[in-house]
Amino acid sequence: MALVSATEMLQKAKAGHYAVGQFNINNLEWTKAILLTAQENASPVILGVSEGAGKYMGGYKTVVGMVNGMLEELNITVPVALHLDHGSYEGCLKCVAAGFSSIMFDGSHYPIEENVAKTKELVKIVAEHGMSLEAEVGAIGGEEDGVIGMGECADPEECKMIADLGIDFLAAGIGNIHGKYPENWAGLSFETLDAIQKLTGDMPLVLHGGTGIPADQIKKAITLGVSKINVNTECQISFTEATRKYFEEGKDLVGKGFDPRKVLAPGFEAIKATVKEKMELFGSVGKA
Ligand SMILES: [Zn+2]
């Protein structure tokens, strides 16, 4: 199945009270692990690519080629969207040209007027390409490709203003942050989320920084309109832990344990386990 936009899968998720995971990819192992897990669990999936990861993988066209090749040759039939995560305006245009099926424009660091103006431009462009567009209001804390913010809460009125521009789904800060959560984290602001959902209606809402949010808070967020949850750090941690164990146990020194395909295998399996666990928590298993 060819890449699809994320619009339909997220509208279905919102109506069905579950969420679709966005799992960020860093290389071939990540991509293959996530696609195979989605297929095995009959779950729709969104592959997230940050601008930094896109550059790391050799550019957006390389990513598109790799993902399209796997969709065909691994016989992936579940809906898959390839999505630019926290794109700049220029990055969004590059991903449209490269063949992504979805983009996020992160204009949260602009004054609201400029965020609105740039989002409007992109609404027109993605419509011409049958793609989906995510916009962000209220900076999401933590660090994302060098941009650091604290766990802010978005202004529901500003959310409504951006939602009405014709975007497909909206990321709003509700006290969530990227990366590991600090010990003294206050938790998600369900009051803010509730107020945003009341004003934005059917618009699927996006929760960034899914790593480390307790399962009960994730479930409650889904009941309040969150239909897309971004997971990045958690796969990185499970991959690295499994890889570290491989070396600590000296497996690289046994037989052909130095073979990179053997070295990367435990991390690959660890990503699969993390993704499966998240799909079960989000309720997307069997929804493809
Ligand atoms: Zn994010």
Image (cartoon, grey):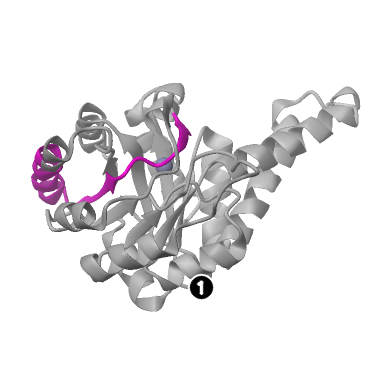
Residue at x 53%, y 63% (from the top left corner): 218
Q: Is residue 5 visible?
A: no
Q: In this view, does 162 lie to the left or right of 237?
A: left
**Magenta-drawn segment:** 117-144
Name which residue lies at 13% across and 35% down: 114
Q: Position of residue 139 (x, y in %)?
A: 35, 40
- At x 51%, y 33%, the residue is 26
Helix, strand, or loop for circle 1? loop
- Asked whether residue 96 is drawn in magenta, I would say no
Residue 226 appears at what percent x and percent y?
Answer: 39, 63
Q: Quadrant of the N terminus?
A: bottom left
Above or below 226: residue 230: above
Position of residue 129 in the picture relative to residue 258 (left or right): left
Between 46 and 159, the one lying in front of the other is: 159
Which class describes the residues within 10 Å of circle 1: few (<14), some (14-19), or many (20+)?
some
Q: Nearer the viewer, residue 250 or 20?
A: 20
Magenta span includes 132: yes
Three-letter residue code for mark 1: Gly
Counting labels gives: 1
Q: In this view, does 253 lie above or below 242?
A: above
Residue 91 image position (x, y, % from top left)? 26, 29
Q: Is residue 286 visible?
A: yes
The quadrant in which the C terminus is found is bottom left
Q: In which quarter of the image is ligand 1?
A: top left
Quarter-of-image position of residue 260: top right
**Residue 183 in picture, x, y percent from top left:** 65, 43
Q: Name the residue that disc number 1 marks.
A: 286
**Closer to the camera in the image, 39 or 162:** 162
